[in-house]
Image (cartoon, rainbow, N blue to C red):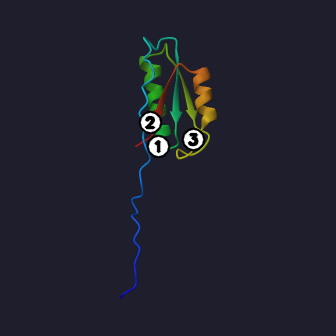
Amino acid sequence: MSEKLIVHNPMGYPPQVCGKPLAARLASLDGRTVCLVDCRFDDSDILLKSVQAWFAEHMPAVKTVYKPIRNVYTKDDPLTWQEIRDKADAAIIGVGH
């Protein structure tokens, strides 16, 4: 066996990750709109509809909007993110189980 064998590492190379600061916390959610964003991961719709029911029962002064992204969770959705920036005061991103 004088044949040269080339082996590739299947782990690949992780991308450079840069941290971003969190958004400023609102003093109160009363009278505000919270977008419940469904990233279409397994059962995230069930989770977010439960969160929406919780808000309706415990914080009725908060308006919640259930908002599924336009594509699957592996694809970015700039239109939805811009719509949330324009129309909501806060967002909860649901990823299911």
- Amino acid bearing label 2: Leu
Residue in view at x 47 percent, y 40 percent: 44
- Percent of width and height locating residue 15: 44, 47
Are there few (<14), some (14-19), or many (20+) residues within 10 Å of tag 2? some
- Percent of width and height locating residue 50: 45, 31
89 vs 80: above or below: above
Residue pointed to by mark 2: 47
68 vs 53: above or below: below
Which mark's residue is nearer the viewer, 2 or 3?
3
- Percent of width and height locating residue 76: 57, 41
Are there few (<14), some (14-19), or many (20+) residues within 10 Å of tag 1? some
- Amino acid bearing label 3: Asp
26 vs 40: above or below: above
Are there few (<14), some (14-19), or many (20+) residues within 10 Å of tag 3? few
- Separation (CA) of disc 2 from disc 3: 21 Å
- Left or right: 29 with respect to 67? left
Residue pointed to by mark 1: 43
18 vs 31: above or below: below
Residue pointed to by mark 3: 76
- Left or right: 92 with respect to 66? left
- Percent of width and height locating residue 77: 60, 38
Could you tell me if the residues under marks 2 and 3 are in contact, i.e. CB atoms within 8 Å? Answer: no
- Left or right: 34 with respect to 9? right
- Quarter occupied by the N terminus: bottom left
- Where residue 4 sits, quadrant-wise, is bottom left
Could you tell me if the residues under marks 1 and 3 are in contact, i.e. CB atoms within 8 Å? Answer: no
Which residue is farthest left? 1
Sequence order check, earlier mark of 2 and 3 = 2
Q: Nearer the viewer, residue 24 or 50?
A: 24
- Left or right: 20 with respect to 38? left
